[in-house]
Image (cartoon, rainbow, N blue to C red):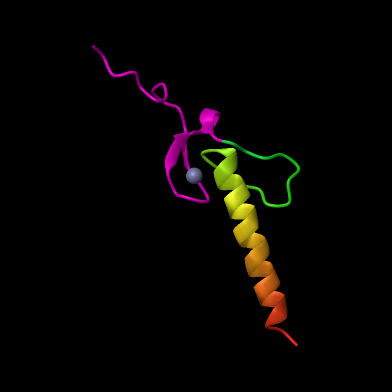
Amino acid sequence: MTDKPIAPPGEPMISCDACRKEVPLSAAFTPEGAEYIGHYCGIECYQAFVAEAKRREAAGRAGKP
Ligand SMILES: [Zn+2]
C-alpha cells in the first residue's frame, strides 16, 4: 500500500483564496476573465469568495456618503 501523492514533486502549490487550503496549481480552480481573479480549491470556494467580495463591496458603498 502506498499513499498516492496529491501532486508530483515540484508541482507548485497555491493556497485557496477562500479557505486557505493548499492545493496543487494544476488542480486549482482559476477563473479566467472573471471579475475576481484568484486560485481556489474548487468552484464552491470561488463562488463563496465572489459572494463575500460582493457583500463587502455593497457594505463599503453603503458606509460612504
Ligand atoms: Zn477552498
Q: Main secondary structure of the magenta part?
A: loop
Give yes or no for residue 19 being in the magenta stretch: yes
Image quadrant containing the N terminus: top left
Q: Residue 58, position in %: x, y?
A: 70, 71
**Residue 55 against residue 40 in the figure, above or below:** below
> Which residue is painted at 54% across and 28% down in the image?
26
**Residue 54 against residue 11 in the figure, above or below:** below
> Which residue is painted at 29% across and 19% down in the image?
3
Q: Residue 32, position in %: x, y?
A: 71, 39
Q: Residue furthest top?
A: 1
Q: Residue 49, position in %: x, y?
A: 59, 53
Report whether 20 appears left or right of 33.
left
The front one of 10 and 61 is 61
Q: Which region of the structure is painted magenta?
A: 1-28
Report whether 7 appears left or right of 39.
left
Q: On the image, which quarter does residue 33 sit in?
A: top right
Q: Residue 13, position in %: x, y?
A: 45, 36
Residue 61 appears anywhere in the view: yes
The front one of 52 and 40 is 52
Give yes or no for residue 41 being in the magenta stretch: no
Report whether 29 appears left or right of 62.
left
> Which residue is painted at 68% across and 62% down in the image?
54
**Residue 19 against residue 24 in the figure, above or below:** below
